[in-house]
Image (cartoon, grey):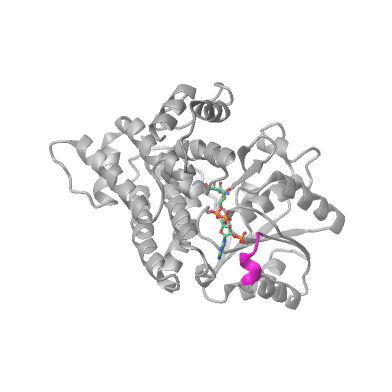
Amino acid sequence: MKDFKFYAPTYVQFGRDAELKTGELVKKFGGKKVLLHYGGQSAIKSGLLKRVEDSLTQSGIQFVKLGGVVPNPRVSLVREGIELCIKENIDFLLAVGGGSVIDSCKAISAGRFYNGDVWDLYLRKGVATEYLPLGCVLTIPAAGSEMSDGSVITNEDGGLKKDYCVDEFRCKFAVMNPELTYTLPAWQTACGVTDIMMHTMERYFSKDDEMEITNSLAEAVLRTAKSQVKIALANPTDYTSRAQIMWAGSVAHNDLTGCGTSGDWATHMLEHELSGMFDVSHGAGLAAMWGSWARYTMHENIARFARFAVNVMGVEQDFHSQEATAEAGIKAMEEFYHSIGMPTSIHELIGKEISDKEIEEMADKCSNNGTQTIGALKVLNRQDMINIYKMAK
Ligand code: NZQ
Ligand code: ZN
């Protein structure tokens, strides 16, 4: 069993009308002047942004607004946010949105006091030593950024998508009202649940799998997300399913489902190149890659894939062949993806045939020109990446 560190300091305010407490929470965590960061239209249209503004005002918190975060958030807006924070003497960041808005806030947090360009941090060319504190009002359960230590940013100059992870990126608080997710389009609901499940699966498919409490927690999160998404898709205003998906999103990525395991993350790394190059939704990109990754690596721990098949996918155990059980589990997962509208190949994801040249370019970026490997269940080099992309074609 692997030694582990567990650090989940985020104060969670969960339930109906939770956003009305935002001002109080900013105050509790010492904010006096806030950068209110949000996305395109959804938070304005639903009236959420106005409710958050009113809550801040009622608590005597000043704020400056910066909207326009797009999915796969761009470093150019991050730079704008940093300038604004300096000019306006901002002391707290508030994200109203999903993973993209929260990640953009985190990048602003790291870049605010960094003596250089914020993108250097994502390229591991520098380290930030001081951070602005942040909180969030979550509107889509998916990325888990509300409790995670990560931020993923896209540099539109070159289509590079990179992550940066530090404990200072853990939100001081996360406001989670499941009702805020009623307006999610079916596609975003499904992408979100795919990402939630994948955050658990990245930790679950490990060689360090002897910690039963972690295994059982992971399987419970997976079964819950898998069953509740069907209910939410059929009835978008079903509070109970929306609430369970929302909480699953946080539990899946606050490290609880990975205590004592290694964590693989190869599917995520392969996907980040897809969304960097084709600007696709992260969750859909994961669904397009996972089956190919699974078939390529399953022999590293066939018993684990067989257990997943039975305990999560409800496949009947083939007592003569663990391999057949494992393969049936992968197939069942792909059928599940299709049943919620997710793709299971790159072709389905981007709507055209990907070229070998594009695959080579993604493998170059993912392996940093052949100098880096990814994955832990099976360590993957540049050629492995090409092989998996080709299987997923
Ligand atoms: O911009 P608006 O108009 O708000 O629309 C958004 C956006 O188009 C919409 N949306 C959000 N809440 C809504 C809503 N529409 C209607 N009603 C609502 N309540 O949904 C779209 C997607 O939003 P986004 O924030 O991009 O989604 P998500 O939370 O999936 O975030 C994806 C990003 O997070 C990164 C991904 O790579 C991607 O860039 N990730 C971040 C991680 C982390 N920080 O720990 C880990 C993840 O693995 C992931 O890589
Ligand atoms: Zn993810």
The answer to whether 324 appears left or right of 126 in the picture is left
Residue 88 seen in the current view: yes
Of the pair 279 and 292, the residue shown nearer to us: 279
Name the residue furthest right. Answer: 87
Q: Is residue 84 above or below residue 164?
A: below
Q: Is residue 383 above or below residue 59?
A: above
Q: Please say whether residue 40 is one of the residues in the magenta stretch.
A: yes
Name the residue furthest front. Answer: 352
Q: Is residue 46 above or below residue 326?
A: below
Q: Residue at x 54, y 25 (%)?
A: 372
Q: Quadrant of the C terminus?
A: top left
Q: Residue 273 at what x, y percent from top left?
A: 54, 36
- Which stretch appears magenta? 39-45
Q: Residue 329 at what x, y percent from top left?
A: 27, 44
Of the pair 322 and 47, the residue shown nearer to us: 47
Name the residue furthest left. Answer: 320
Q: Quadrant of the N terminus?
A: top left
Q: Residue at x 75, y 64 (%)?
A: 31
Q: Residue at x 42, y 73 (%)?
A: 238
Q: Residue 119 at what x, y percent from top left?
A: 71, 38
Q: Please say whether residue 109 is one of the residues in the magenta stretch.
A: no
Total tally of numbered discs in the picture: 0
Residue 260 seen in the current view: no
Q: Residue 84 at what x, y percent from top left?
A: 82, 54
Q: Where, by quadrant of the figure, is residue 267 drawn?
A: top left
